Image: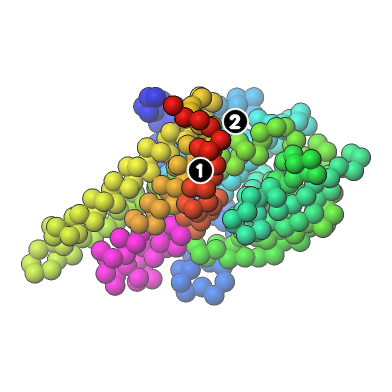
């Protein structure tokens, strides 16, 4: 493996840094002080700037107006977005659009990727299931009725659902096959209820009661859901890494200035050791992230399927980002809980990322199943 980033990938990072340079994590009310959502909508002006910088079409081919890049490039951009807590559905929309281009039928591929890459359509994915612990594809049933598919069930904690034009809903058939249905907002037979994340952002619970979706808007290609789920999970790891890196930077800056007994607390051995442990966490998160993104991007084989590397990355991301923010709070003392200081926001976002697409325990179980099913050595 060669983890050296290509010129195109590095150019995407520079473009992202330029777009996110003016974003403030304190751009909305604090979730600790807001009884409901911190804002009604995601950051639309930022979304427009991402579209102008061609960062919404990274994974799309040139025919769709994209850059033809891979999961590594997307993760590099997501890493930068998390450093400023960018309030945009960059991961969900990019991943869903790429899945449509890769697995969708001709009618879907003809128009949707181009419009989504320009920021005209916003997509999200119902990947949480009913509880966040059960497989999302088991939360909704799908049966074919002539030229339509009929969906019944419920999906919870759908990110940015109130703003998305289309929700990609995984559903299982009576034969055990998984399909992906593109459900428009406000579609007949659906009810969207508001939920609130620890971040203070609006999520959605989507209930489907005999909702009918035309066949061209249902993706039945084998492996589509597994590929999309792996990309979403890996992207979540990239967000956790970027957030953790920014939190450690904030902690380093604070402990270098905060003095006790006439010395910066950063010079105390106990403080330095804790910061060093968190640095090791971040480097492990980074190594496992690029391994997973590389497997998704190249389709390279291995002792385990790519989902094994994704599981390892998410285990490290979930546990690592939790340890990073907890140590940061400890080393900041009471200042870390000050609602006029951004650290408490990063802590709230870290908790959301820790549990998104499954906590570490869920991925440890999945990894155990993979190890049991594939002989190593």
Dominant secondary structure of the residues highlighted in magenta in the image:
helix
Position above or below: 306 against 136: above
The extreme right residue here reads 146
x then y, percent, for residue 265: 16, 62
Secondary structure under the numbered disc 2 in the rendered image: loop
State the residue at coordinates (23%, 50%). Answer: 276
Q: Label 1: which residue?
A: 368
Q: Position of residue 193 (x, y in %)?
A: 70, 65
The C terminus, quarter of image: top left
Q: Which residue is at 8% across, 69% downward?
A: 261
Mark 2, other Cα within 10 Å: few <14 / some 14–19 / many ≥20: many
Residue at the left extreme, as displayed: 262
Residue 326 within the magenta-colored segment of the rendering: yes
Image mark for residue 286:
none
Label 2 near label 1: C-beta < 8 Å?
Answer: no
Mark closest to the chain's N terminus, 1 or 2: 2
Labelled disc at residue 60: 2
- Magenta range: 325-351
Colour pattern: rainbow
Residue 243 lies in the magenta stretch: no
Q: Is residue 257 in view?
A: no
Residue 251 visible to the viewer: yes
- Helix, strand or loop at label 1? It is helix
> Camera-side residue: 287 or 57?
287
* x then y, percent, for residue 72: 47, 33
In this rendering, the label closer to the viewer, 1 or 2: 1
Residue lying at 56% horizontally and 35% vertically, measured from the top left: 373
Q: Residue 5, located in which quarter of the rendered image?
A: top left
């Amino acid at each position: 493996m060669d983890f050296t980033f290509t010129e195109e990938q590095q150019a995407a990072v520079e473009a992202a840094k330029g777009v996110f340079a003016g974003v403030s994590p304190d751009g909305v009310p604090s979730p600790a002080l807001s009884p409901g959502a911190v804002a009604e909508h995601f950051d639309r002006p930022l979304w427009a700037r991402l579209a102008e910088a061609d960062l919404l079409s990274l994974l799309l081919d040139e025919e769709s107006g994209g850059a033809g890049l891979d999961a590594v490039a997307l993760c590099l951009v997501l890493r930068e977005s998390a450093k400023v807590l960018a309030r945009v559905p960059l991961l969900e929309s990019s991943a869903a659009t790429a899945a449509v281009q890769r697995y969708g039928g001709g009618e879907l591929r003809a128009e949707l990727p181009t419009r989504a890459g320009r920021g005209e359509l916003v997509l999200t994915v119902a990947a949480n299931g009913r509880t966040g612990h059960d497989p999302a594809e088991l939360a909704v049933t799908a049966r074919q009725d002539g030229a339509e598919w009929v969906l019944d069930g419920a999906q919870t904690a759908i990110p940015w659902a109130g703003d998305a034009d289309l929700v990609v809903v995984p559903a299982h058939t009576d034969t055990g096959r998984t399909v992906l249905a593109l459900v428009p907002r406000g579609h007949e037979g659906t009810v969207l209820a508001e939920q609130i994340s620890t971040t203070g952002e609006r999520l959605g619970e989507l209930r489907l009661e005999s909702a009918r979706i035309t066949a061209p808007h249902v993706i039945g290609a084998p492996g589509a859901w597994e590929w999309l789920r792996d990309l979403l999970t890996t992207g979540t790891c990239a967000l956790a890494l970027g957030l953790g890196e920014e939190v450690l930077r904030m902690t380093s800056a604070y402990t270098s200035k905060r003095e006790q007994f006439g010395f910066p607390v950063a010079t105390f051995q106990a403080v330095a050791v804790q910061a060093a442990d968190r640095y090791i966490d971040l480097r492990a998160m980074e190594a496992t992230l690029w391994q997973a993104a590389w497997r998704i991007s190249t389709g390279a084989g291995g002792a385990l399927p790519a989902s094994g590397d994704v599981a390892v990355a998410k285990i490290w991301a979930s546990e690592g980002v939790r340890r990073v923010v907890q140590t940061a709070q400890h080393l900041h003392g009471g200042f870390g809980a000050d609602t006029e200081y951004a650290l408490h926001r990063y802590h709230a976002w870290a908790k959301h990322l820790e549990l998104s697409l499954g906590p570490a325990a869920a991925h440890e179980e999945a990894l155990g199943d993979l190890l049991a099913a594939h002989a190593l050595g």
